[in-house]
Image (cartoon, rainbow, N blue to C red):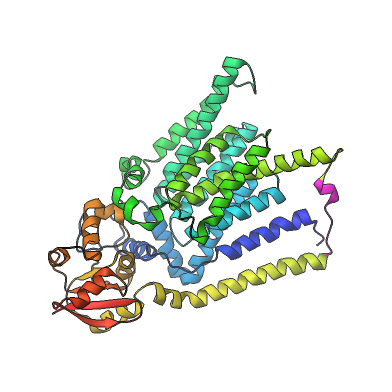
Amino acid sequence: MRLTTRQLFPILLFIAILLMTIRPVADPDFWWHLRTGQWMVETHSIPHADPFSFTNVGKAWTAHEWLSELGIYGLYQLGGFPLLILSFTAIITASFHLIYRCSPGRPYFAGFALLLGVITTAPTWGVRPQMFSLFFSSLFLFLLDRYSEKRTIKWILPLPLLTVVWVNLHAGFALGMGIVAVYLGSDFLEWFWSLMTGAGNKRYFRDLLPLAAILATCGLAVLANPNGARMYIYPFETLTSSAMQAYIQEWFSPDFHRPEWQPLAWMFLALIGLAVFARRHSIPLARILLTLFFGYMALHSMRHVPLFVITAVPVLAGLAETTFEATRSAFKTGAYSPAQKAPRLPGWVNILLILSVVLAAGGRFVSVINDQPEIEGETFPAAAVDWIIANHPDGKIYNTYSWGGYLTWRLRDYPVFIDGRADLYGDQFIESFLKIYRANPGWQESLSGYDVDLALVETDSAIGNALAESPDWVLVFSDKSSLLFQIR
């Protein structure tokens, strides 16, 4: 197997990406997704009202991720954490491969731009339904890019069917329709410009009709879900929730003082710097518009960083290639073919390099699986839950927001106070929860109003300190991360 460096590079790149995306399950929302999938299997139905909390039981719930949750539970039943982690690692890697295929300057310019993008999105990875939206967004971009290049309708025919699947996996389906709309809008602007000036590629109005028809069909495809027409407005309700924007960390703007968000700053700087030097480029208008829009969204919320990355990587690769060629032509004349000058490595070197990276990925996977119980114990109140199961104290539990999903999965006899379904609980209830959690004046009255008998909170929380000082509560269990109180 004698491969050139150009052939070997993408193989090593994607095995390395696979290695990097192998992560333990640490997302607080994973547990209520898992429990929801189990609930659906047990009841043979899709939930439309809250079955898990005692504070909002029976309240209308838009379970927009129901198909993801069935999939998560099914994978867990088939292969536990190893299969779950491996499956979502494959989904994330496949998403990046699609973006690589969309990028000019393969393999090197596209590869290094993609590698920067991969590092940039690392804080958002996990076994979570959002990864389906990452994959489908990448797939939509890939298909629309192919359609824009070839103007063959076969590339966009699958989009309505993909929308049917996506709308049942995650509310991010709205991104797909938005991406189609941007490509349609850019075609319209190019048609209008050519009509007004006669410059550029000649466009005809009829060229807009296929994308317009696909967009309308995708809009109708949204109705193919258990929540019906409500899914038209649900994504926008989430985006405009003041409590979610103000109190849930993944909706915060990226903190560039933290090292994990430095690659995002590098990507912005690289785009700006290369755009200055690459005076002539052939970046499609749709790509530029999407990069600008999702760039703004990424600065607004770290949750949107992956969407910025998958639109920006092809732009970054194209600008890098254009800048390199322009710089090279200024110092050297004559034709240049990277493929002709790419050396072929001996077969044993190729095999050794690939095997080394594969073994590293395998070792990483085994290490993550072995560390999963420890991660669970450090991130969630596993020991406190074990104590509750063993002693089964009576009463309702007040719990912290990030632990609600874990309690939903492990404590079937104890409905939770709150979990990660912020859209279900609403802004007003979250404000009430935070008043207690922060031990603001009047927290005792607010807590007693919910008739709770137990409180499971973090050791360093304000409510934990307040309960420890209260004569009405007694500490019945504690470890380095959790405190369990019982009312006297």
- Viewed as shown, does residue 422 lie left or right of 110? left
- Viewed as shown, does residue 324 lie left or right of 402? right
Number of labelled discs? 0
Image quarter hosting the N terminus: bottom right
Indicate whether residue 342 is drawn in magenta: yes
Q: Residue at x 41, y 36 (%)?
A: 219
In which quadrant of the rendered view does residue 327 lie?
top right
Image quarter hosting the C terminus: bottom left
Range drawn in magenta: 338-346
Q: Residue at x 44, y 34 (%)?
A: 217
In which quadrant of the rendered view does residue 429 lie?
bottom left
Measured as percent of width and height from the top left, residue 409 is found at: 33, 69
Measured as percent of width and height from the top left, residue 12 is found at: 69, 61
Measured as percent of width and height from the top left, residue 293 is found at: 48, 39
Task: Note whether residue 197 is visible.
Answer: yes
Q: Nearer the viewer, residue 9 or 123?
A: 123
Q: Residue at x 83, y 42 (%)?
A: 336
Q: Looking at the picture, does residue 401 appear above or below residue 115?
A: below
Measured as percent of width and height from the top left, residue 261 is found at: 51, 56
